Amino acid sequence: MDLTYPPEAEAFRTEIRQWLEDNLPEGWFDEGFTMTDQERGAWLEEWTGKLFEGGWICATWPTEYGGKGLTTMQGVVLSEEFARAGAPMRGDFFGDTLVGPTILQWGTEEQKKEFIPGILSGTIAWCQGFSEPDAGSDMASLKTTAELDGDEWVINGQKIWTTQGFVADYVFVLCRTDKDAPKHKGISYLLCPMDQPGVEVRPIKQIDGAAEFAEVFFTNARCPKDNVVGGLNNGWAVAMTTLGFERGTSATTGYRRFENELNSIIEIARGNGAIDHPVIRQRIAACHSKVQIMRINGLRSLATVVSGKKDKGVAALGATNKMFWSEYHQEVMELAIDILGVKAQLLLGEPGKEESVPGYGRRATNAEYPANALQSAFFFSRSETIWGGTAEIQRNIVGERVLGLPKEPKVAS
């Protein structure tokens, strides 16, 4: 694995670094730089405009669809320099990272012209309609149906754990469009408007009082006939592409959020003396080692992509990484709670105040349940081995597709 970036990539790094220095607020790189919540809110609105003008939003997309057409290495350098500077990219994960690339790969020219500009400009908000109450890990068992009625699909069913469902304009939703086909073969991938009488969104309140997830109920909801992505009854293949983007993005920068978070936990341990306990030190060292494994795996993945070589060890790297980081995060969050000690039993946040979540950005403390940023991260980590494909499913993928182990026996029907 060659860890040396080519000269043209390093030249591009210099360009990006200079742009960040020219456009970030004065003093951004100084130690102790802060902004009030009001200042930060106003700056973020201005910053999104600068990103759009600079062409840095979805910059790896083809130029004919509004991107900059950056190479893989340029895209990596762009992400690395923004992460190094702690500068936020536009945070539309579902549009920029999931449905946008999926439409570019599978969509018709008409779909690209209709939806890609709205994704780039941030005028269309998206959510993902995959999981159902009885179809989570076994997603192909989904029961939500779409039946053709003239020029529209009529959708009936229920989705769950729909992040941002209450603010989205569109949902990319998996529906069963052929009841008689094998369960993986009769699914289609539809782009359905959310703002209509047939769609009901119910927020799901979490343990810390937040409600980022929602249930979505479809009752004779309408979706244009031409909004099927990737062809009728080919939704399973299209969805696997979307999940690949979800599990495999930010190869060389994803570890940084965990590194920043671990550093903040170490500072707490130094401050309250927990760092002097030999078991705590050993656990910190183990977590540090795992963060470095994430870094090396990311570089390995990048080297394989750039070289164009096929490597059996990275054939299911997305599954391996998802399993590894989600289980690591639960481990380090349990360490953080142990370091906090008895204080962890108290609600340490200040109601209504925004806090910086190490490695994630800022969040407002919930007034009903004022957990601080670290406590909220602990709660959220419990879900991370479930969403995006459970750890058990990731193990099946690695075992069957990489190691060549026998497939798991199917349950008798």
Image: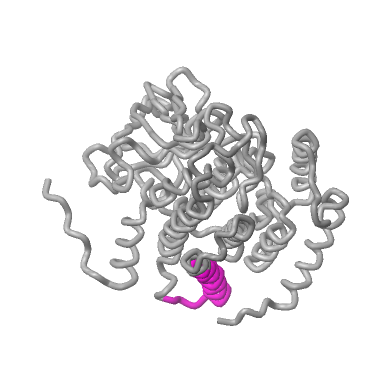
| Residue at screen point 82% across, 52% down | 28
| Residue at screen point 52% across, 67% down | 281
Stretch in magenta: 285-311
Looking at the image, can residue 250 be seen? no
Q: Is residue 48 left or right of residue 111?
A: right
Q: Position of residue 295 (x, y in %)?
A: 56, 69
Q: Position of residue 79 (x, y in %)?
A: 67, 60
Q: Mostly what secondary structure, the magenta segment?
A: helix
Decide: is 277 above or below 383.
below
Decide: is 151 above or below 284.
above
Decide: is 178 above or below 322.
above
How many marks overall? Answer: 0
Does 299 lie within the magenta span?
A: yes
Q: Quadrant of the N terminus?
A: bottom right
Q: Nearer the viewer, residue 252 or 108?
A: 252
Q: Nearer the viewer, residue 88 or 412?
A: 88
Q: Quadrant of the C terminus?
A: top left
| Residue at screen point 79% across, 42% down | 35
| Residue at screen point 37% across, 21% down | 219
Q: Position of residue 188 (x, y in %)?
A: 37, 41
Extreme bottom residue here? 2
Q: Position of residue 95 (x, y in %)?
A: 57, 43
Q: Is residue 272 left or right of residue 201?
A: right
Q: How is the image coloured?
A: one colour
Q: Nearer the viewer, residue 54 or 229?
A: 54
